[in-house]
Image: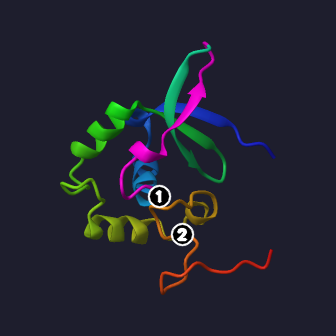
Amino acid sequence: MVKPRIVKDYEKLPLDVVEQIKIVYPRGYLHHLVSFVNKEGDRRMGLPFETEDYYYLIRMSKVKAEEIIENDDDYDDDGILKSDVKDAYEEKHEDVEFLEEYNSNEDNTFGEDGDGEEEESDG
């Protein structure tokens, strides 16, 4: 099954999706932006995020990615998701399996076992 692709502005995302994105990108969004061509043929930047049902490209420029983090009280002065906030969001969304399955990156600990080592796969 091919997932529908949704291109959406960050401000228009539901709160639960924003919280899940913060778990996936605890060190901010800037270094995870990808380039894409919109339906008008213009090159744009976006943040990829995948759920069980959708593949999101969240529209944002590099400047916007920095502004979002700078203006968000969930992040500290260094642009890192505060540990108490991260813990609260992880607990709230612990049953959301797709976070780990589809969204592993160098900024989160998905795919690692409890001691920080990557889990070995059978594949």
Q: Residue at x 59, y 29 (%)?
A: 36
Q: Position of 82 compared to 51: left or right?
A: left
Q: Is residue 11 magenta?
A: no
Q: Residues within 10 Å of mark 2 (few under 14, many from 20)?
A: some
Position in image of residue 65 (x %, y %) = 35, 38
Disc nearer the start of the sequence (2/1): 1
Q: Which mark is drawn over residue 86? A: none
Q: Residue at x 63, y 17 (%)?
A: 39
Vertically, is 34 above or below 69? above
- Toward the top, the furthest residue is 40
Q: Is residue 35 magenta?
A: yes
- Answer whether labels 2 and 1 touch (C-beta < 8 Å): yes
- Toward the left, the furthest residue is 77
Q: Residue at x 30, y 40 (%)?
A: 66
Vertically, is 57 above or below 119? above
Vertically, is 7 above or below 38? below
Amino acid, disc 2: Phe
Q: Position of 81 compared to 48: left or right?
A: left
Position in image of residue 29 (x %, y %) = 40, 46
- Toward the bottom, the furthest residue is 115
Q: Which mark is drawn over residue 24? A: 1
Q: Secondary structure at mark 1?
A: helix
- Assign the C terminus to one quadrant of the image: bottom right
The residue labelled by disc 2 is 110
Q: Residues within 10 Å of mark 1 (few under 14, many from 20)?
A: many
Amino acid, disc 1: Val
Q: Secondary structure at mark 2?
A: loop
Position in image of residue 5 (x %, y %) = 65, 35
Q: Residue at x 42, y 32 (%)?
A: 60
Q: Which residues are magenta?
A: 25-40
Q: CA distance from mark 2 to mark 1?
A: 8 Å
